[in-house]
Image: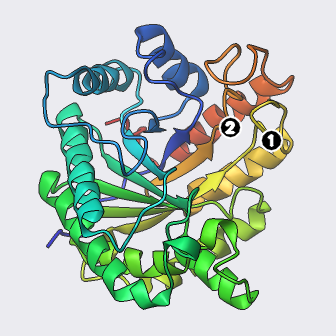
Amino acid sequence: MASICAWPACPKLLMTAGLNIHKQTNPEQAAYWGKTVGVQGFLINYVATDWQTDVGTRPDSSTWQLLRRFQTLYSRQGVTDNFIKIGLYKGHDWHDARESERVTRNLAHAAALARYAGLKGLALDLEPYKPTWGGTAGGPELARLVEAEGRKMGQAMHDAFPDMTLFVLPDVLREVEHEKKTSVDWASAHHGGYQLSAAFVHGLLSVPWSRVVIGTEFTYSAHAERIEPYMQAAVERYRGALGEWKNNFSIAPGLWPLGPSAKDKSARFSPDEFRQRLQVAFHASKQYVWIFGSSSAWQKDGPFGPVPGPVATSFQQFLNVIHQVRASCDTSRGMPRNTK
């Protein structure tokens, strides 16, 4: 069983979206994200996109070599804490045992790749972009099966990368709780809703992970004073699912300051509001704070969006906030910045 973690002096700032590893694995881009923007890790898309993607087991393959090269280049610029992000862009048939076996294999291969490349682990995005946790995917009668499959998938990833950090987003237990409180019909909710995700997460968290991080999305637009209470509530929701390794568990609040849509790079709130929220998030977080990047909102002429274009007019102020909050955290906690 893992021992109690020694958490870093200050949380590290991660980014999801905004990066295309196939176009931006070079020293210039590594310096841009690590020094100019000031992030310390990515939830990386386009490697193992979904549960159906098999990255294989060959270190000499182009995917394995690309990810290792990415980690080498970016870590030199302080972008050390990277994760392979895996989504649910296709549905899953829980009645099909062979399909579940293939997914278990694919997740194990992704974990092995993360270990080989020197990443921290995997980030599982459990938002059902296609029915997975309800609707046509099945009802509550599948809860025991889904929990058992979640345990198998978790164990396979853990066996492939015993020291990995498991990053899960969003806070699916909150989504289930919200659906129950609002009497949402889980068969007609967002792609069938989240109900079965609770069983899956209980199975997933029965594995003795070195570290587990839950990334919250309901903090995207929360006012600064609401972020820490939301995080505390999330801890309580997961308390019953945690084993003896509960001290290795943390909540990572997500913020969404720029890019309301893929076609709009403008600010969702002011730089000063971003400062307030980022300060609270850094104060309350043990390990990570993360930003939803929304296409290329954080980069002029970035790789995403319908046409290349400039960033928001206040963009430099947002960059200043990141560097100032990180520096302030380092100073207030009395330790040098942890970049390893």
Could one spot residue 210 in this view of the protein?
no
Q: Which residue is drawn at 76% across and 37% down?
A: 258
Q: Could you say which is closer to the camera, residue 320 or residue 56? A: 56
The residue where tag 1 is placed is 260
Q: Could you say which is closer to the camera, residue 34 or residue 181? A: 181
In this view, 328 is above or below 190: above
Asked whether the residues under the numbered discs 1 and 2 touch, taking CB atoms below 8 Å apart as contact, a structural biologist would say: yes
Residue 186 left/right relative to 106:
right
Could one spot residue 119 in this view of the protein?
yes
Q: Residues within 10 Å of mark 2 (few under 14, many from 20)?
A: many
Q: Which residue is drawn at 26% across and 65% down?
A: 154
Give amino acid for label 1. Answer: Pro
In this view, 234 is above or below 112: below
The alpha-carbon separation of the residues under discs 1 and 2 comes to 7 Å
Coordinates of residue 161 in the picture (x, y in percent): 17, 51
Quadrant the C terminus occupies: top left
Q: Residue at x 79, y 15 (%)?
A: 310
Coordinates of residue 11 in the picture (x, y in percent): 47, 50
What element does badge 1 sit on?
Answer: loop
The residue where tag 2 is placed is 294
Quadrant the N terminus occupies: bottom left
Mark 1 or 2 closer to N-term? Answer: 1
Give amino acid for label 2. Answer: Ser
In this view, 340 is above or below 199: above
Q: Could you say which is closer to the camera, residue 29 or residue 103? A: 103
Coordinates of residue 304 in the picture (x, y in percent): 65, 23
Residue 190 left/right relative to 82:
right
What element does badge 2 sit on?
Answer: loop
Coordinates of residue 321 in the picture (x, y in percent): 70, 36
Q: How crowded is mark 1: few (under 14 residues within 10 Å), some or many (20 or more)?
A: some
Q: Could you say which is closer to the camera, residue 333 or residue 24? A: 24
